[in-house]
Amino acid sequence: KFEEIYTDLQTKIDELAERILTLGHTPAHAFSNYLEASEIKEHQNATSGEECVQGLVQGFSVLLLKQREILQNAGEADDEGTAALMGDYIREQEKLMWMLNAYLQG
């Protein structure tokens, strides 16, 4: 499942970069820019599957909050394309969060 999540996030990063370009802007290119700006911190030294899943839950919790902010801003700007993209991401990731939390409780 971890590889599936990784691949899905790579696809979403590409989609977001394309969206930024479509809107006439330039996405950040340097990894150091992402590290500085990110509110999701790297999860290090996880030694069990449960720790890895907890790290995913923490990261996706932050990501969902940011996506909801983008959705609201896109709606206020009448940016239907970005709003639709965020709506899709939120729906998918809420389901993933439900599955991850069910794993942790089970």
Image (cartoon, grey):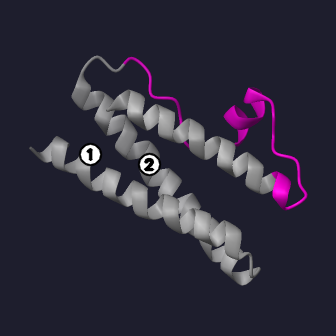
Q: Nearer the viewer, residue 71 or 22?
A: 22
Residue at left 64%, top 66%? 70
- Estimate the x, y position of residue 48 in percent, counting from the top left: 24, 21
Residue at left 49%, top 40%? 8
Q: Earlier in the sequence, mark 1 or mark 2?
A: 2
Q: Is residue 49 left or right of residue 38?
A: left
Q: CA distance from mark 1 to mark 2?
A: 10 Å
Amino acid carrying mark 1 in the image: Leu
Evaluate if marks 1 and 2 touch, with contact meaning CB atoms under 8 Å apart.
yes
- Estimate the x, y position of residue 38 in percent, counting from the top left: 64, 42
Q: Nearer the viewer, residue 81 or 52?
A: 81
Q: Is residue 80 left or right of residue 45?
A: right
- Estimate the x, y position of residue 33 in percent, counting from the top left: 77, 35
The residue at which mark 1 appears reads as: 100
| Residue 80 in magenta stretch | no
Q: Quadrant of residue 94?
A: bottom left
**Does dot 2 land on a helix, a strand or a loop?**
helix
| Residue 28 in magenta stretch | yes
Most frequent secondary structure within the magenta stretch: loop
Q: Nearer the viewer, residue 44 or 101?
A: 101
Residue 27 in the image: above or below residue 71: above
Q: Is residue 31 left or right of residue 26?
A: left
Q: Is residue 76 visible?
A: yes
The residue at which mark 2 appears reads as: 60
Residue at left 52%, top 29%? 42
Quick one: quadrant of the C terminus? top left
Amino acid carrying mark 2 in the image: Phe
Q: Which residues are magenta?
A: 21-45
Residue 33 in the image: above or below residue 86: above
Residue 10 in the image: above or below residue 19: above
**Among all residues in the image, which is located at the extreme left?**
106
Labelled disc at residue 61: none
